[in-house]
């Protein structure tokens, strides 16, 4: 049974058990169910999983960011292609999360839920720091202390500077770079280990939340899913296509048609990294991008361009803030945008890492990490859609950069039959 099926099954069983507890009144204070199940077994397993997510955040961000910066190569040789692609990737990510926050906040998802007396959502928000403090604290006076305290903006800043410094040292630092790459691989395996218990954690977290809040929470979750899917599709079919047309003059309809099979592959794998070979073949053989551009922009995009993940973080932040009645304010939302843009640079393109990044964003703006439990059950399915959006953003930026550099063959781009054999080989494990 696949992880996705297991997670969905865990969510379904959690909803059923939670509703039984809620509707039968078994969750009343002092009952056996409340003491040993809802606030006993379910609380312990769910909390252990949340702690495991938090455990991974700092080392994962540090190693991923350093490897991402080192993967760019010599800073002096990045040139126009590197600069253009980096700027476009950051812009698309910022637009993605800004639109997600704007739409989610405008629709008010999560508002109106009565959390009185629900132990699952007892939380006191912390005051938002002034902008000057946020900017000053980005530069850590003690990076080790920042890591120990989980202060992610200083950790991100230190990681980027550390990675750039490794590049500048050159060959002398190759052993350090290789060591960090090995540590990054280890962290990826740890992510897989932690996500292996996700189905059971989903069951416990959802059963506890539904047991406390009943059908009202179920309705709010449905609204969260609809809003998140809507924002993802808006970014894919409107934002990215408008950028493609305005910045390159290429026909967006042709792009959507030619990238469809690659998007389906990304949807099925939920991994931007696993889709890199398929994306490369699609942009070179179907869209006509020269390999000299695509071989840099596609892997680079899979490393730092996480539009879909940023959208999830924006919608989830608004949703959880409204459920917990936390007013983030303009400063809080700006912090979320900044965190998500910076975190996207270090977000590995493998399933489940988005949740770890979300815990980092929550901690930064003062939202309870436990809120992740409310969206965890539906996240695995939504992760598949996010991945399709991520690789589409990579392809759009690749086409724009290639066109600006004269490295795009428009006759291939406009030929509906160019590269059609790619579709026949998507199931080939050697692709």
Image (cartoon, rainbow, N blue to C red):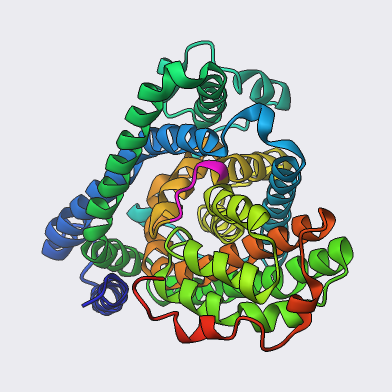
Residue closest to the eye, 212 or 335: 335
Q: Where is residue 363 in the image (x, y as percent from the top left)?
A: 47, 38
In the image, residue 361 above or below residue 371: above
Quadrant of image for the C terminus: bottom left
Compared to residue 148, the image places residue 49 above or below, namely: below
Task: Judge by depth and name the residue closer to the eye, 278 or 365.
Answer: 278
Residue 212 horizontal/vertical position (percent): 33, 64
Q: Where is residue 257 in the image (x, y as percent from the top left)?
A: 67, 84
Q: Establish if 164 lies above or below 418.
A: above
Tell me the quarter of the picture where residue 32 sits.
bottom left
Give the residue at the far top of this rendering. Answer: 141
What residue is at 81 percent from the left and 63 percent from the top? Answer: 243
Q: Can residue 204 be seen in this view?
A: yes
The N terminus - image quarter: bottom left
In which image quadrant can residue 375 be found?
bottom left
Rendered residue at 55%/28% (across/down): 160
Overall secondary structure of the magenta stretch? loop
- The span shown in magenta is 345-349
Q: In which quarter of the image is residue 214?
A: bottom left
At horizontal 42% and vertical 63% (from top left) the residue drawn is 274
Question: Residue 360, how many percent across, how many down?
Answer: 47, 41
């Amino acid at each position: 049974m696949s992880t996705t099926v297991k997670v969905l099954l865990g969510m379904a069983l959690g909803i059923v058990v939670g509703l039984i507890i809620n509707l039968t009144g078994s969750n009343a204070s002092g009952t056996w169910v409340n003491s040993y199940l809802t606030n006993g077994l379910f609380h312990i397993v769910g909390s252990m999983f949340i702690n495991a997510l938090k455990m991974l955040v700092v080392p994962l961000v540090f190693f991923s960011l350093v490897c991402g910066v080192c993967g760019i190569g010599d800073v002096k040789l990045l040139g126009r292609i590197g600069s253009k692609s980096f700027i476009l990737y950051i812009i698309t990510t910022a637009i993605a999360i800004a639109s997600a926050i704007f739409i989610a906040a405008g629709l008010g998802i999560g508002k109106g839920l009565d959390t009185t007396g629900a132990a699952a959502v007892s939380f006191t928000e912390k005051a938002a720091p002034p902008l000057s403090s946020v900017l000053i604290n980005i530069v850590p006076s003690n990076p080790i202390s920042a890591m120990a305290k989980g202060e992610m903006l200083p950790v991100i800043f230190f990681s980027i500077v550390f990675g750039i410094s490794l590049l500048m040292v050159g060959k002398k630092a190759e052993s350090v770079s290789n060591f960090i790459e090995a540590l990054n691989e280890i962290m990826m395996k740890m992510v897989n280990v932690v996500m292996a218990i996700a189905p059971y954690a989903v069951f416990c977290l959802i059963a506890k939340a539904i047991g406390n809040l009943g059908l009202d929470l179920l309705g709010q979750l449905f609204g969260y899913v609809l809003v998140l899917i809507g924002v993802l599709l808006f970014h894919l079919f409107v934002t990215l296509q408008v950028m493609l047309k305005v910045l390159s003059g290429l026909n967006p309809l042709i792009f959507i048609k030619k990238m469809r099979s690659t998007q389906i592959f990304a949807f099925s794998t939920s991994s931007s990294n696993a889709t890199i070979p398929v994306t490369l073949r699609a942009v070179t053989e179907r869209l006509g991008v020269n390999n000299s551009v695509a071989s840099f922009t596609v892997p680079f995009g899979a490393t730092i361009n996480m539009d879909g993940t940023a959208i999830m973080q924006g919608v989830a932040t608004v949703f959880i803030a409204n459920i917990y009645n936390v007013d983030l304010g303009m400063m809080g939302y700006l912090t979320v945008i900044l965190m998500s843009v910076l975190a996207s640079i270090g977000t590995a393109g493998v399933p489940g890492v988005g949740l770890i990044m979300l815990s980092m964003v929550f901690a930064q703006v003062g939202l309870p990490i436990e809120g992740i439990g409310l969206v965890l059950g539906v996240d695995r399915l939504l992760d598949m859609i996010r991945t399709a959006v991520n690789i589409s953003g990579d392809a759009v930026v690749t086409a724009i950069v290639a066109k600006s550099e004269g490295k795009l063959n428009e006759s291939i781009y406009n030929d509906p039959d160019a590269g059609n054999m790619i579709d026949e080989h998507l199931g080939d494990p050697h692709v």
